[in-house]
Image (spheres, rainbow, N blue to C red):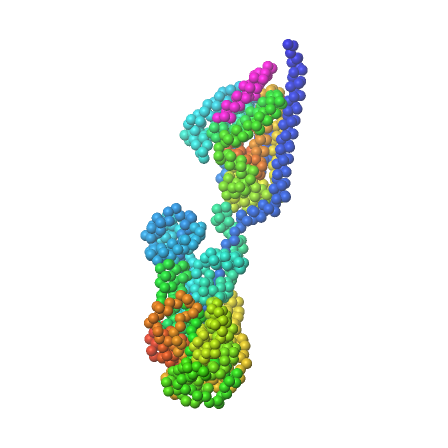
Amino acid sequence: MQPHLIKHIWNLIKEPLDGWLMLFLGLIFLLSLMVLYSASNQSFGKIDNKIVYTMLSLLIMWTISRTRPQLLMHLAPPVYGIGLLLLIAVHFKGVTVNGSTRWLSLGVTRVQPSEILKIALPMMLAWFFQKYETQLRWWHYAVASVLIALPVALILKQPDLGTATLIMAAGFFVLFFAGLSWKIIIGGLVAFSASLPVIWSMMHDYQKKRVLTLFDPMQDPLGAGYHIIQSMIAIGSGGPWGKGWLKGTQTHLDYIPERTTDFIFAVFSEEFGMIGNIILVVLYLLVISRGLMITARAQTLYGRLMAGSITLSFFVYAFVNMGMVSGILPVVGVPLPFVSYGGTATVTLFISMGMLMGIANLRK
Amino acid sequence: MDRPTRLKNVQAEESQFQVRLLAAYSVMIILFVLLITRFVWLQVFQYQHFSTLAQNNRISLVPILPNRGLIVDRNGVVLAQNFASYTLELTPSKIENLNATIAELGKLVDVTARDMKRFRKLLEDSKGFEAVPLKVKLTDEEAARVAANGWRFPGVEVKARLFRDYPYKELTSHVLGYIGRINQQDKDQLEEDDKTTNYRGTTYIGKTGLEAIYEDQLHGKVGFEEVETDSGGRALRSLKRTPPVNGDTLKLALDIRLQEVADKLFGDRRGALVAIDPSTGGVLAFLSKPGFDPSLFIDGIDNQTWAALNGDPRKPLINRALRGVYPPGSTFKPFISMAALETKVIGPNDIRPAPAVFTLPGSSHQFRDADKKGNGMVNLQRAITVSSDTFFFRLAWDMGIDRISPTVGQFGLGSRTGIDLDGEAIGVLPSKAWKAKRFARLGAAYSKWLPGDVVSIGIGQGYNAYTPLQMANATAILASDGVAFKPHLVQEIVDTSSGKVTLLDAKPERVLPFKRENFEYVKQGMASVLQPGGTAAAIGYGLKYTMAGKTGTAQVVQIKQGAKYNASALAEGNRDHSWFIAFAPVENPRIAVAVIVENGGWGVAAAGPIARGLFDYYMTGKIPAAIIDQLKTVPHEAPSSNATPLD
């Protein structure tokens, strides 16, 4: 009797979930707990928090994965609209931290509306292309571009180059899978390259400094270059096999900045070495492969576009974070997906995973 | 326009979508491979480089200072030592408003005007990043007060430091010298000598005297502690400790009690005294009067005190024993006597006239004797005893300079003795070559040796000029029948960790190739000087041991080495300098001395009694009555261990 009940509940829980994704994410999560334990100097405070918000996120993911994607799709215009309004509100009434205005104060807590757009924008675009699926003309792409440009411009103004880039990428991936002409893509790339000097002149000093020290961190070893140099030392000194779990000197002697959040990869890399890095990259690649498989099998255009955009965005997060920590990309505040400590980003990620699973379920 | 069929459109769309998926997948894989390439580069190819950087981050070397070696006298009395005390140190680069901070600190500790002056001067020399002491030797109470208020003063620290103490101050200033803060010049020198590593964390270095000469032995070897540090520079734990090797202890031949007796016998008079053990070359006493307090220099001297010391007409900073050059006067006679006997210009039994006046053949110039009646016919020994000038005028004339210089030079006159102090003066041993070189600028008429030049050399005047150290050394060589040691202050160097003792200059440097009977002959003449009929009979009155000596009176000539030496300031001293050289006991000399009292008049008047008092103490342990109440170091009446009374 009792085994039967447990089995019944187990089936109920796992029914909407994708087994492969759960396996890969579970392995990443285990690694992330190990590295967080080390990065927080073997204290359980952050571990406990992480487990709690991960459980909450899993619940949200589970709920979303059970929800029909078509139902969620209809929420796209209002969510997108609310997101835009909140971004405008940030512009006028936002809370300024470290020179950036990214947050809205809700009394007890603060919310970051740009986080909403990470999902709302691709949803909105996918809804839009699904709606005009059979009659797509060039101007549909133009309208879609405007839908992208509005939030991106608002976020750039905060300023938050990292998030703006991620959101623009998420939107672009929808356009890409919706069949945006190669000519326009290549033309756009050329135009983008040509406009780099203009973008450069519009960048804030701290952003320019970050880009400059990317190319030569030694230029400012005690200032802007300090973080990246120390994190490269951590990675390099990890060597092929790593210094061993809990044995990273750069980590434990406080040389790695932001070592539980944006730079947690340096901690991982120091202690687990190149082998650890390759394992992590392979795990990410497996998540991405599974995501693309779901994308390929998606039944509706909305499903394809959403699944494609979510998967490629996931890649971008992982790649940009590891790239910046290892010194081949500029330092923009992008967390390492599922590993970096931080509730908001994790919730957003699990929501997108829930949507991915929901799309996969539709096929069944 | 006919539209393509719905089905075809869907198929086209489908294949286009698959192509794009594949394209995206390929790009992602390529980018991941790129990332892994980066890891391989950093973690395999650059591993050594980054590993070293991480190690450098992790470990910092903290120097552990060795304790500077002690300096003790021959009986183990401490002459230079270390003591721990608190200093109040300011790091200007970390302080926003220096004046305000100092004003605030002034409410907690007593910052005197002198402290301020010295601080300003050190500040000028520093680069702003190093801590500069505002006040040294805080009381415990002051240190506690500053420490309790420390949070109010960023850049202000109370540090426990080792200080150097010279308990005998003026008494040892010209022997020990002093240490001082390492300045830029010292840093450059350390750099040149490749010693910077050993001086990491060291604040002081020997500047003059024994402190400078034996710097390497006194300093010791710095130790290091490998400390794991975090990014804030905080030390977390010690990984490895290499203990420092403390500096060696210098044990001097000098007897501080003898030194103090000499000092008190001098009283306020200016001059110098050097006493040497003829059987070892060890310097028993080394005094230059007046001295100065060396501790004034350790933490930087303020301009005002410096000006006062440097401008003092008594010139306390000049080491007269080492650098003061004086004509030897009649104390030269025993040495020229040795030269005359060795060159056989005169025999021991030859009788020569000692008239009131000596006149050169073919000249009307009269060289007068000090004794207006003259001394009749005397032999060389008697001429020494009565110090007949005319006898020695003629002797010098008979010998000629070419026979005088090389023989007298054997006693070390006119060359550096090689004592373990820096800046020794050479003096002048006159010779034809010396004069030619000395006056070359003025042309042949002045630089040519004239026959008359030799005459006054016979009585230690003319070009003759020697340091008190040289005279003491020459007397010691004479006393030991020509066995010459290099005079030395430091007798032993004691390795404090192993207890290993290194003896210095234990062997004679050379033996003069002179006949023993000639030494005995001259020494007997000197012994008679202190006996009735001798020029210093008064000095020899009541002797409980045997003593030989020679008085000397040098015409006032300013100290040649110190051009700063202002003759007009000494106008009080138109009197001659008073010399006395002596040794005792005559048969088996244990002490030889040279004393000069500037402007002291006749040798027998000023310098003689000092030598007698010194010998009385050294030979019998008896303290001269005149100074018995002034002595700090000598236990009253109790004879010192090395001063055994004669039976």
The picture quadrant where one finds residue B638 is: bottom left
Q: Is residue B414 visible?
A: no
Q: Name the quarter where the N terminus of chain A is drawn.
A: top right
Where A265 falls versus B418 (above or below)? above
Q: Residue at position x 44%, y 70% from top?
A: B323
* Residue A152 painted magenta: yes
Quick check: B368 left or right of A218? left
Q: Give the camera-side residue of B137 and A252.
A: B137
Q: Give the camera-side residue of B244 and A282.
A: B244
Classified by dominant secondary structure, the portion drawn in magenta counts as: helix
Where B400 falls versus B172 (above or below)? below
Q: Residue at position x 37%, y 59% from top?
A: B303
How far across and how far down the image is residue B494, in percent? 50, 69
How far across and how far down the image is residue A181, in percent? 62, 21
* Residue B413 painted magenta: no
Q: Give the camera-side residue of A131 and B143.
A: B143
In this figure, what is the number of numbered marks?
0
How far across and how far down the image is residue A95, in percent? 43, 31
Where B245 falls versus B41 (above or below)? below
Q: Residue at position x 35%, y 74% from top?
A: B574
Q: Name the quarter where the C terminus of chain A is drawn.
A: top right
How far across and how far down the image is residue B66, in percent? 49, 61
Q: Is residue B200 visible?
A: yes
Q: Residue at position x 50%, y 78% from top?
A: B401
Q: Give the camera-side residue of B642 and A212.
A: A212
Numbered range of the magenta stretch = A125-154
